[in-house]
Amino acid sequence: MEFDKKFFDFVDQAVQEDIGSGDHSTLTCIPKSAMGAAALKIKQAGVLAGVAVAEKIFSYKSAHSKFTVLINDGKEVNSGEIAFTVESDIHSILHLERIVLNCMQRMSGIATLTKQYSDKLKGFNTKLLDTRKTTPNFRLLEKEAVRIGGGENHRFGLYDMIMLKDNHIDFCGSIEKAILKAADYVQSKNLSIKIEVETRNLEEVKKVINVGKGKVFRVMLDNFTPTQLIEAIRMIGDDFETEASGGINLENIEEYAKTGVNFISVGALIHQAKSLDFSLKAVIK
């Protein structure tokens, strides 16, 4: 993950949202010059994610912070363990406590669920993808959590891939028109982005095969049964990458992987994940 302007803008906005006109709870009882330390305590087992994010948040917002990593991102953790300690001015620790916890709890929940899915795909060539079903303004960290949990990121937004979904196709008039218009658009704009097309049945798969060669790089097979998926993959051959999506869960993902599909995308990795329970506690020496 790149800690770029987008990330630091997110941190600034999160801090401003929380502090507003001032952290009056802290201002009332802690001198501004007071220094202290805190530890991130694990209260629920799972896959840890967000330690690197926490370190960047503290280093960015507190010039005096000393951050010590005890457990790295991607490691399985258990209740009672300490993920990191931070030494800084106490005002910064208290200002950033909830922001860091919110990020890490959410990210770790996503990483934990993603690992459950990715473990099911061991032994298969199928790769696990996330989707754009993310929390507004939190996508950067949610997709990083998927990566930490063993999945891969699909497109980040509407700008880095053309994905012709059912509504695009229906509004355009046909799947053939949509593909041809998209290919012309990419060429006329001299863009380096790829085109993926969603199909809803075998008839639409045939249409992509007929007009999409040299234009489309991946075919999404949406809400296909494993039997239908096998037939679609047979028809497609090596002309396009294949992606299965829709109705896939922990109970049936292996059945879908057995079809030989290249990718399986699961929106639930993010929107069904439950946050893990952590706390940031003062270390009193």
Image: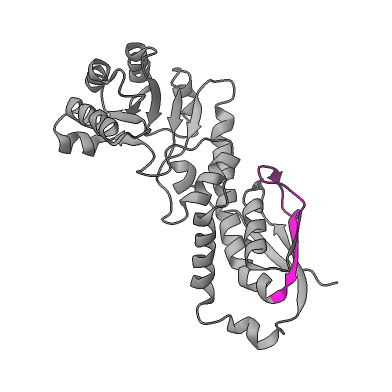
Q: Residue at x 66, y 52 (%)?
A: 51
Residue 223 visible in the picture: no
Q: Position of residue 219 (x, y in %)?
A: 34, 25
Q: Position of residue 37 (x, y in %)?
A: 77, 68
Instruction: Tell me: residue 59, above or below residue 95.
Output: above
Q: Residue at x 67, y 68 (%)?
A: 62
Instruction: Tell me: residue 114, above or below residue 78.
Output: above
Q: Residue at x 43, y 43 (%)?
A: 156
Side of 51 relative to 228 (left or right): right
Q: Quadrant of the C terminus?
A: bottom right
91 drawn magenta: no
Q: Position of residue 277 (x, y in %)?
A: 62, 57
85 drawn magenta: yes
Q: Residue at x 40, y 46 (%)?
A: 133
| Colouring | one colour
Q: Quadrant of the N terminus?
A: top right
Q: Which residues are magenta?
A: 67-90
Tell which of 237 and 280 is nearer to you.
237
Tell which of 194 and 45 is nearer to you.
194
Instruction: Tell me: residue 3, above or below residue 171.
Output: below
Name the quadrant containing residue 249: top left
Side of 275 relative to 182 (left or right): right
